[in-house]
Image (cartoon, rainbow, N blue to C red):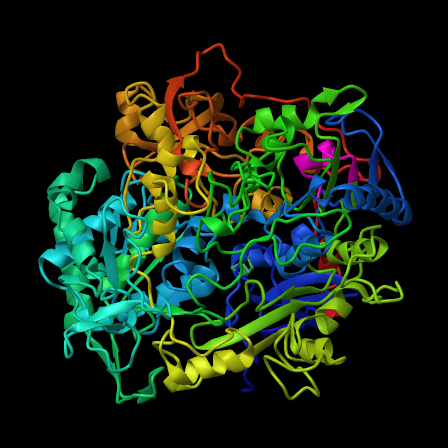
């Protein structure tokens, strides 16, 4: 009898075209394949060939088409017609919009370029925006890093020459023990999920240190629900235990760190705490063979690691290692001493230290790969300490975050687990010299560009951007005595300082993709008031230009709105000059290509910036005869701009297409990228994959690629002489010294070895019994930017956020699930609905960030859960610390880097009374829809048009 044949189509074609590009639904930059049907985006899938995600696509990535088709997309340039905040605009054309912007900015540039404050959010074109600001001549530029994770970045770059996340990653293939601090799902996303999968598959131990047990912490083998802001103390207690037990990698310390370098001991002297140096300025060690001081980096040196020595001339010196041992063996760091403050039992700390040492030393990895060190010495194998670590904003967003990150790096170095098999590894173009060889520039003159980039890395007080009396040169006070190592600026202070005219007034605030009237602002209500404050016929902040793709809360406060495209409608460049897509085993960069053309009167912001620059005749943006240098706008710039001869935005297919890293511009470069899935990727040879701070092959290659200027070893800095130089200035030494007001602060926080101190606001203002709870936020797995709040698919997951409270704490306070409470801080109060849970530190409450919305914004209904039940904790966070004696209020930031201290917040929660409305507070006047924007449909039926066409879709 004939058998019935089953006919099952396992993979029905769903598209008539597939274009490869790069995701922008978070900062991971995964490769995606966008399926198009009849010119419409139908489906997004992961690109299996892409080095970042190898085909993996997260929920945000696949929901990207909802962002693309969002009813909240801006549709044309807008000029304000009503009062700021009223949301009253008229549509204008691009010619008028660019003419207005060029008129405003041109006058500023001719008069005083620093009257322009140009700040961008989490955009991925900082290699362009920073360079543009430099050409304009304003020092008042930065991106979002100051309110994100500059502590992590700066601590890494001043210690290791690299840092977590974008500049380094765990050796997921080999690590045996993984310690993760303070990480939510947004930094990093797919790569960490893939990595954790590998760890779990191999049975490696994963310990998560985080007050909240969600996301990655929920799948950890061990969760340590630490008290917020005390991670540094826990880490230094681990250091104490390892030193005490002599479970450290001395070989690694001597070879690769400044542990044996000599530090001058001369209390009260101008050279106290500086490295002992020879006449050529080379740092010295004490050589065992000759029993005298010699160049610490000489290949023949045989350094003594501990002890006190007398230098020629009689000065006393000791080693960095000796100073470390003296400090961290102190009983103040013993597990019993720190247990109460951290909330981690002493026995757990002791066990953790033992487990770290066991993984590092008993599970040592030996790779049979010969390599050559920087001095030309051949080494027969690569020895690895399979312990790796990762930390992000949970550590960074405290006012002690810089030192906490330094402490984590110190722990890594003691274990010898930097860039070794199984350890934490650099991603090219890192490591770089410590600190990177770029200084901040702030000398601003009419009609003139800055002498170099606005952002950089100071090496001492002389590199600060301050006037002779200590007055900051930047509007955000970055690189002043208030935040000397502010490598990413202080975006969270720009509006406050501009409003207060402290240190000076500005004319125009130019923001891109940063929702500073809502979730990107501390003190959101106060910020709204500052943006709207009238003065005479105008405003206290005279002009605001805002560029965004969506109708965010900030739009209503702009005088001129420049609508951006979505990420699927433009070219982007993910450059090695900025934050590339490299892996530990490979260097890489990427582009985005326009997958579809805009159907609205919008333009890519990068195109607008280049056109504006040409109109303003900015150097570098026009030819000598005044013609635009990049008539093809950003795509033209990506291909043809050269930062140095041969070094441009993209490293792949340069010159005739055969060169990588350096080479002349290649007119076909973008086509080559597109043909290759929009990325370039170079696999580093095996013998150059580890110990890259001292690996000759790697350093030579990195020099040839233009990553570093010289193939010299990068000596890891346990002890930071840069910090000590600031401390000496505060003690009255040197030509550039802080004003009296700042001296105690600089002296206290510029310790050359990592320290721990209570977060500043907690220490200064909030009495423990009045505000007993820590309050923190994190990004949910389903959303990264505020953008996700208008994404129909993602809204179904997080339409409103709750305040999560530990069940015991809730019961003690007489609270039950779904109760409404007031969250009260010394600064303000917010009303929220609670959810009780077990997996959170008992002294901590938390919520998802950027879910709560202002009514009407994002083209959501005024009754949307985001604005009725979702809440924004930012209303309770102050951008300023309590007043000092004398009245001055420092920003609510890390005193070293200026990182916004979002997570220092202390609160109490009080049950709302029964007669109060069950909705969040504060509420604001609903924002009207901008002209040109259609009302959002009641039900978004995205995809319905494809459903009826199934049969014809083959
Ligand atoms: S992890 Fe980020 S970049 Fe990758 S697919 Fe998800 S949203 Fe896109």
The vertical placement of 97 against 505, above or below, is: below
The vertical placement of 836 against 784, above or below, is: above
Between 954 and 817, the one lying in front of the other is 817
Q: Residue furthest left?
A: 245
Q: Position of residue 275 (x, y in %)?
A: 30, 60
Q: Quadrant of ligand 1?
A: bottom right
Q: Position of residue 751 (x, y in %)?
A: 31, 47
The vertical placement of 866 against 670, above or below, is: above
Q: Position of residue 577 (x, y in %)?
A: 58, 66
Is-magenta flag for residue 24? no
Between 551 and 308, the one lying in front of the other is 308
User: Could you tell me which residue is drawn at 51 percent across and 69 percent down?
Assistant: 52
Between 291 and 171, the one lying in front of the other is 291
| Apparent side of residue 900 relative to residue 604 in the rendered image (left or right) | left
Q: Which residues are magenta?
A: 550-560
Between 654 and 749, the one lying in front of the other is 749
User: Could you tell me which residue is drawn at 14 percent across and 74 percent down?
Assistant: 291
User: Could you tell me which residue is drawn at 57 percent across and 29 percent down?
Assistant: 524
Q: Quadrant of the N terminus?
A: bottom right
Q: Position of residue 411 (x, y in %)?
A: 25, 58
Query: Which picture quadrant has residue 30?
Result: bottom right
The answer to whether residue 459 shows anywhere in this view is yes
Q: Quadrant of the C terminus?
A: bottom right
| Apparent side of residue 329 relative to residue 712 in the rendered image (left or right) | left
| Apparent side of residue 660 relative to residue 161 in the rendered image (left or right) | right
């Amino acid at each position: 009898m004939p058998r019935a044949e089953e006919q099952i189509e396992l993979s029905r074609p769903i598209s008539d075209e597939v274009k490869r590009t790069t995701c922008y639904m978070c900062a991971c930059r995964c490769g995606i394949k966008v399926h198009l049907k009849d010119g419409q985006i139908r489906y997004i899938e992961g690109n299996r060939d892409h080095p970042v995600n190898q085909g993996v696509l997260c929920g945000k990535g696949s929901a990207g088409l909802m962002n693309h088709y969002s009813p909240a997309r801006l549709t044309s340039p807008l000029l304000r017609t009503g009062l700021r905040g009223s949301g009253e605009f008229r549509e204008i054309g691009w010619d008028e919009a660019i003419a207005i912007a060029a008129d405003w900015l041109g006058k500023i540039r001719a008069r005083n370029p620093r009257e322009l404050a140009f700040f961008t959010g989490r955009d991925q074109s900082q290699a362009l925006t920073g360079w543009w600001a430099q050409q304009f001549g304003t020092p008042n530029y930065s991106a979002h890093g100051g309110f994100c994770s500059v502590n992590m970045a700066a601590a890494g770059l001043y210690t290791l020459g690299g840092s977590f996340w974008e500049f380094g990653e765990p050796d997921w293939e080999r690590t045996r023990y993984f310690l993760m601090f303070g990480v939510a799902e947004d930094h990093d996303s797919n790569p960490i999920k893939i990595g954790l999968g590998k760890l779990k598959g191999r049975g490696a131990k994963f310990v998560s240190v985080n007050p909240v047990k969600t996301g990655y912490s929920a799948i950890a083998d061990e969760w340590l629900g630490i008290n917020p802001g005390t991670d540094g103390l826990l880490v230094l207690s681990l250091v104490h235990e390892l030193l005490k037990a002599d479970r450290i990698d001395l070989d690694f310390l001597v070879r690769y760190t400044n542990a044996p370098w000599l530090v001058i001991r001369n209390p009260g002297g101008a050279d106290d705490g500086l490295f002992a140096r020879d006449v050529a300025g080379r740092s010295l060690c004490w050589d065992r063979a000759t029993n005298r001081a010699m160049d610490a980096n000489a290949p023949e040196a045989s350094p003594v690691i501990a002890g006190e020595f007398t230098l020629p001339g009689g000065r006393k010196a000791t080693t960095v290692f000796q100073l470390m041992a003296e400090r961290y063996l102190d009983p103040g760091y013993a597990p019993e001493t720190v247990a109460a403050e951290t909330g981690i039992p002493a026995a757990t700390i002791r066990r953790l230290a033992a487990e770290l040492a066991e993984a590092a030393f008993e599970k040592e990895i030996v790779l049979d790969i010969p390599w050559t060190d920087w001095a030309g010495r051949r080494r027969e194998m690569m020895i690895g300490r399979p312990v790796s670590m990762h930390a992000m904003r949970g550590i960074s967003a405290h006012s002690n975050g810089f030192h906490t990150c330094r402490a984590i790096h110190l722990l890594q170095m003691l274990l010898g687990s930097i860039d070794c098999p199984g350890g934490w590894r650099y991603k090219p173009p890192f490591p770089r010299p410590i600190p990177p060889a770029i200084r901040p520039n702030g000398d601003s003159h009419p009609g003139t560009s800055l002498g170099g980039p606005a952002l950089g890395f100071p090496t001492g007080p002389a590199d600060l951007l301050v006037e002779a009396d200590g007055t900051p040169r930047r509007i955000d006070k970055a690189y002043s005595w208030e935040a000397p190592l502010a490598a990413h600026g202080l975006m969270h202070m720009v509006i406050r300082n501009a409003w207060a005219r402290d240190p000076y007034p500005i004319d125009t605030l130019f923001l891109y993709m940063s929702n500073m009237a809502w979730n990107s602002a501390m003190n959101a209500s106060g910020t709204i008031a500052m943006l709207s404050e009238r003065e005479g016929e105008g405003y206290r902040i005279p002009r605001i230009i805002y560029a965004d793709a969506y109708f965010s809360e900030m739009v209503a406060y702009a005088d001129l709105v420049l609508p951006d495209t979505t990420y699927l409608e433009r070219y982007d460049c993910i450059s090695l000059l900025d934050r590339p897509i490299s892996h530990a085993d490979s260097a890489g960069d990427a582009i985005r290509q326009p997958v579809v053309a805009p159907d609205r009167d919008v333009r890519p912001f990068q195109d607008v910036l280049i056109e504006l620059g040409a109109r303003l005749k900015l150097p570098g943006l026009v030819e000598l005869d005044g013609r635009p240098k990049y008539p093809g706008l950003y795509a033209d710039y990506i291909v043809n701009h050269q930062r140095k001869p041969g070094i441009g935005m993209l490293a792949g297919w340069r010159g005739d297409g055969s060169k990588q890293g350096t080479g002349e511009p290649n007119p076909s470069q973008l086509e080559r990228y597109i043909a290759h899935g929009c990325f370039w990727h170079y696999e580093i040879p095996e013998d150059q994959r580890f110990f890259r701070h001292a690996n000759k092959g790697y350093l030579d290659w990195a020099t040839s690629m233009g990553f570093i200027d010289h193939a010299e070893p990068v000596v890891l800095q346990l002890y930071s002489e840069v910090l000590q130089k600031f401390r000496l200035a505060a003690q009255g030494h040197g030509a550039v010294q802080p004003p009296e007001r700042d001296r105690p602060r600089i002296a206290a926080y510029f310790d050359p070895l990592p320290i721990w101190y209570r977060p500043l606001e907690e220490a200064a203002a909030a009495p423990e019994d009045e505000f007993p709870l820590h309050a923190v936020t994190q990004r949910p797995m389903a959303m990264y930017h505020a953008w996700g709040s208008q994404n129909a698919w993602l809204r179904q997951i997080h339409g409103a956020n709750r305040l999560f409270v530990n069940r015991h704490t809730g019961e003690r306070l007489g609270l039950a699930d779904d109760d409404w409470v007031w969250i009260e801080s010394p600064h303000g109060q917010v009303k929220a609905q609670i959810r009780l849970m077990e997996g959170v530190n008992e002294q901590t409450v938390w919520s998802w960030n950027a879910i709560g919305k202002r009514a009407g914004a994002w083209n959501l209904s005024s009754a949307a859960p985001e604005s009725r039940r979702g809440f924004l904790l930012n209303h309770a966070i102050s951008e300023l610390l309590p007043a000092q004696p004398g009245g001055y209020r420092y920003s609510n930031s890390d005193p070293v880097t200026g990182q916004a201290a979002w997570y220092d917040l202390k609160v109490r929660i009080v049950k709302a009374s029964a007669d109060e409305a069950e909705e969040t507070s504060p509420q604001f006047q609903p924002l009207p829809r901008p002209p040109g924007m259609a009302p959002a449909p009641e039900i978004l039926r995205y995809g319905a048009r494809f459903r009826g066409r199934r049969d014809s879709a083959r």
